Image (tube, rainbow, N blue to C red):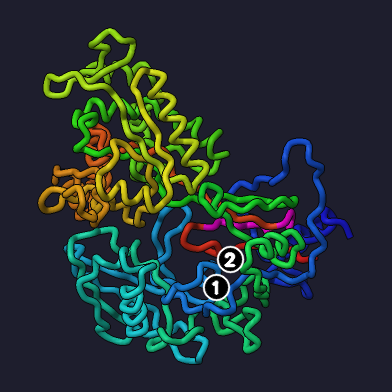
Amino acid sequence: MTKTAKKLILLMLAALCLMPGCDARTAAKQPIEEAPIYDAIAPGEELRERPAADKLFSINYDPVAGMNPVRANSSANMLFWSLMYDSVFTVDDNFRVSSEVVTDYSSEDYIWWVFNIDSTIPFTDGTTLTASDIVYSIQRAQQTSYYRERLSIIYGISALSEDCFAITTKYANSQFPALLNIPIIKKDGYFEDVPAGTGPYRLAESGDRLVLFTENRHADEMPVDTIYLKDCMDTSNKIRAFEDATIDLVTNDPTGMYNLGYGSSNETRYYETSNMDYIGFNMSSMYFQSLRARCAVNYVIDRDYIVAELMSGCGVPAALPVHPESILYDSEYAESFVYDPAKCAALFESAGVSDYDADGELEMLVTGIVVELKIRFIVNNDSTSKVLTARRIAEELNALGITTVLYEMTWADYIAALEKGEYDMYLGELRISPDWNLSALFQPYEGDREDDAVFQGLNYANNKDPRYSQLYGEYLAASDDLTRNAKFRELCRYIGDTGIIMPVCFERREVLTHRGVVTGIRATQYDVFHNFKDWTIDLS
């Protein structure tokens, strides 16, 4: 039977409201919006069918690392933890927050929070969820490097009853629930490799597959009863397994050092991340003590070109420190930073840059002294796209006579240069927490940075202005959406007008599947299987 005929039959079954004998989990599905699909076909390459399938839906896993999501010691196994474990809250592909575990929550001051939960949700061991299980999961997550930073805001947490728990935070944050996208395990299960969970699947006794947990509330909606686990941890084996359809889904970071090439005929979907690429400055640099000099650089960042050509579309141009998909993004203000080299040159001139000694090269006046321009621009060389981006920006500046020397450095040397302040300008990447709080990047520290000191923190700019952190505090403490959005706009304008950082884009990641196998995917950076119940999987 052809695929076209099969699709016609499925449409007829749906229209007849599921005649007897049909599979409700397939025919009852309604078409949903999903991320655009891109064929991974090179120009001129012949389009071919996917490799012969084994009629099993399989994914990669690490059999040695265990599957405890709170310990988070395997990136491969973390990929599918949401199939076995619910999260306290979830963050969707538009960065909105929701929960299927917390029924309601409240806070009058955004410091003392009370959460009520659905205590009828079953664990795979036959017990039901309690507030103590959630408290235990969060407390254990606080001790792990993977979750520690986002949970550092918590001052105290306790269960008030079987179905209610409370959290006290160190400061007011109305967006705090977004930080609780934490997996839930059974109390006292931290040291188990596979603790009991409340997700739609459980690990089979054989250890090589996930099987449907029939007591789960979404069991009847899952697209398959069994998900097979294949050990393909070696990079070449993983690529080969995907080519041969031994595994049916992989993810990829096309802008990172571990970018893998999957050459078969496949479908690629992007999902958005909060990973921001940006230009930062050393505020102690004699070249960038002037805000006009810093702001000038904004206008040689051709964000559209960088994303489209240097990143092959694997990003979203952004001039503000929040993803353009967020309701907080002020598009009108962002437009004021459109690529304009002439404006860059004019701003540098107003900052005292000119050819003072008539040698055909530009210099800068620093406290009345003519100083030759030689901007030290650093970038980590692990990422090809970042190196290309930095080269492009350096070329733009040099074309205007702003002498810029790019240093493409190993990760260790790059971090050492940032910590010691041995740079004027840098290209960085930062994964922003779901509450869009960047205050740590600007937080002033006590005293001055010593040349031989190891700098601790994220304030690489050596910023001493407390206004940035104050504005973030006002945004997080805002009591309603209207005020919160207004405070964030004020914050973005202060960052943009002072030029302390210049966002370039937000990175995207890839989910790859074989042609025609999976539809309905809406992955997120926190959960590739975010809407798994809405997927349709064709293994014919």
Percent x, y of residue 306? 49, 34
Disc 1 and disc 2 in contact, CB within 8 angstroms: yes
Quadrant occupied by the C terminus: bottom right
Drawn side of residue 155 relative to residue 142, left or right: left
Dot 2 amino acid type = Phe
Query: Which is more foreground, mark 1 or mark 2?
Result: 1
Vertical placement of residue 94 versus 161, above or below: above
Give the alpha-carbon distance from disc 1 to disc 2, as whole Å: 8 Å
Residue positioned 43% across, 41% down in the render: 408
Residue positioned 33% across, 43% down in the render: 321
Residue range highlighted in magenta? 514-523
Vertical placement of residue 61 versus 13, above or below: below
What residue would you read off at disc 2?
Answer: 532
- Is 347 part of what is drawn in magenta? no
Percent x, y of residue 392? 46, 30
Q: Main secondary structure of the magenta part?
A: loop
